[in-house]
Image (cartoon, rainbow, N blue to C red):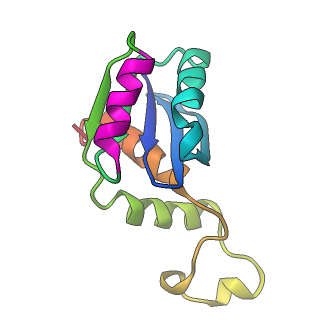
């Protein structure tokens, strides 16, 4: 079983997800400034086999920082095109709008919380399925 720590990098916040072939073990959104420390802790806690980082905002610099901080794990950049759009749709499938918000077309809705963790989840699932390499 392969365990991947996926990261959706961002300027102010980042999404994290730990995913295996069997499902999701962990996901959260954290401040970018805490990312390297938290990623090292989560990777150790879940015995991650590798780390993947979306190649968007600051992905290259982040990957290098992770390689230096966690030298025993491979860190790979992956294509994150369209992952935010797919993550937003999945967020609403798993967290349907309630009350009056359910009457608003989903294309016009904004999620009530950051969904960067869902982006990381999509990156991990694509990677494990051989589509994100």
Instruction: Tell me which secondary structure the magenta stretch mostly adopts.
Output: helix
Q: Is residue 99 left or right of residue 16?
A: right
Residue occupying the point 41% across, 26% down:
66
In the displayed structure, 81 sits above or below 19; it is below
Image location (x, y in percent) of residue 86:
40, 62
Residue 95: in sight, yes or no? Answer: yes
Residue 2: in sight, yes or no? Answer: no
Image location (x, y in percent) of residue 65:
39, 29
Q: Which quarter of the figure has residue 2?
A: top left
Residue at far top of view = 72
Residue occupying the point 53% across, 81% down:
106
Q: Quadrant of the C terminus?
A: top left
Q: Is residue 32 magenta?
A: no
Q: Nearer the viewer, residue 66 or 83?
A: 66
Residue occupying the point 32% across, 29% down:
64
Residue occupying the point 27% across, 37% down:
77
Image location (x, y in percent) of residue 127:
31, 36
Residue numbers of the magenta segment = 58-70
Image location (x, y in percent) of residue 5:
46, 30
Q: Is residue 62 magenta?
A: yes
Q: Which quarter of the figure has residue 112?
A: bottom right
């Amino acid at each position: 079983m392969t365990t991947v720590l996926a990261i959706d990098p961002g300027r102010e916040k980042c999404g994290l997800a730990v995913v295996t072939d069997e499902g999701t073990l962990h996901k959260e959104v954290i401040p970018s400034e805490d990312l390297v420390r938290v990623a090292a802790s989560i990777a150790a806690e879940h015995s991650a086999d590798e780390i993947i980082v979306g190649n968007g905002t600051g992905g290259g610099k982040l990957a290098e920082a992770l390689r230096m901080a966690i030298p025993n794990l491979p860190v790979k950049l992956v294509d994150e095109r369209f992952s935010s759009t797919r993550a937003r749709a999945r967020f609403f499938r798993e967290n349907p709008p309630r009350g009056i918000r359910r009457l608003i077309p989903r294309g016009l809705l904004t999620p009530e919380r950051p969904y960067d963790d869902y982006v990381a989840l999509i990156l991990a699932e694509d990677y494990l399925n051989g589509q994100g390499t």
